[in-house]
Image (cartoon, helix red, strand yellow):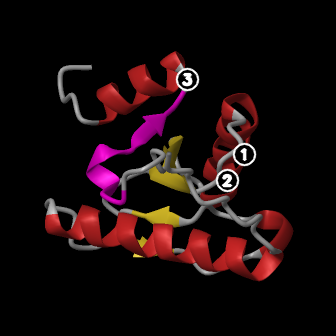
Amino acid sequence: MTTEPKRRARNRRSAKNAGTAWETATVSFLQRNGFPNAARVARSGARDKGDVTLGNAYSVVIEAKNVAQRDLAGWVAEAEVEAVNAGAEVGVVWAKRAGKSDPGESYVILKGSAFVKLLRLGDTTH
């Protein structure tokens, strides 16, 4: 009989390192997939502007999450505040999927109204 090794709880430093690694992986994924201006955003304290930007051509802010505990409503609210802080139209959450290291296999979370706004940003007929 085999038993799974117990996961160690993250401390503040390991959580910060995991978050930074996930942000970096997300930026690399975006750059490899046609968004060369994707970049990590410098921390700005209470007026946080998200974790990842796609550059000035895109009015989107990404809040990257690499945590075990899910808080979708809280995360989306955070992304929306950060979008306002950054002057962006849409804030989304890019959440790491358990057991997957590829950002392309992760989840992008946003409200339905934000999804419609995002679609309209790329639609020249509206």
Residue 46 image point, x, y percent: 85, 66
Q: Which residue is mark 2?
A: 82
Q: Which residue is mark 1?
A: 78
What residue appears at the point 70 percent right and 71 percent down from the top-left corner? 15
Q: Residues within 10 Å of mark 3 (few under 14, many from 20)?
A: some
Seen in the picture, residue 111 relative to 7 is either above or below; the reply is: above
Residue 124 image point, x, y percent: 18, 29
**Marks 1 and 3: in contact by CB < 8 Å?**
no
Residue 53 image point, x, y percent: 44, 64
Front residue of 41/104: it is 104
Asked if residue 88 is among those painted magenta in the image, a careful observer would answer no
Q: Secondary structure at mark 3?
A: loop
Q: Which residue is mark 3?
A: 111
Amino acid on which the number 3 mark rests in the picture: Lys
**Label 3 or label 1, whichever comes before in sequence order:** 1
Q: What stretch of residues is rendered in magenta?
A: 101-110
Mark 1 or 2: in front is: 1
Seen in the picture, residue 99 relative to 55 is either above or below; the reply is: above
**Left or right: 73 in relation to 45:** left
Amino acid on which the number 1 mark rests in the picture: Glu
What is the total number of numbered labels drawn onto the structure image? 3
Q: Secondary structure at mark 1?
A: helix
What residue appears at the point 15 percent right and 60 percent down from the top-left corner? 33
Q: Residues within 10 Å of mark 1 (few under 14, many from 20)?
A: some
Residue 9 image point, x, y percent: 77, 64
**Left or right: 12 in relation to 72:** right
Q: Secondary structure at mark 2?
A: helix
Residue 116 quadrant: top left
Q: CA distance from mark 1 to mark 2?
A: 6 Å
Q: Residues within 10 Å of mark 2 (few under 14, many from 20)?
A: many
Q: Which mark is residue 68?
A: none
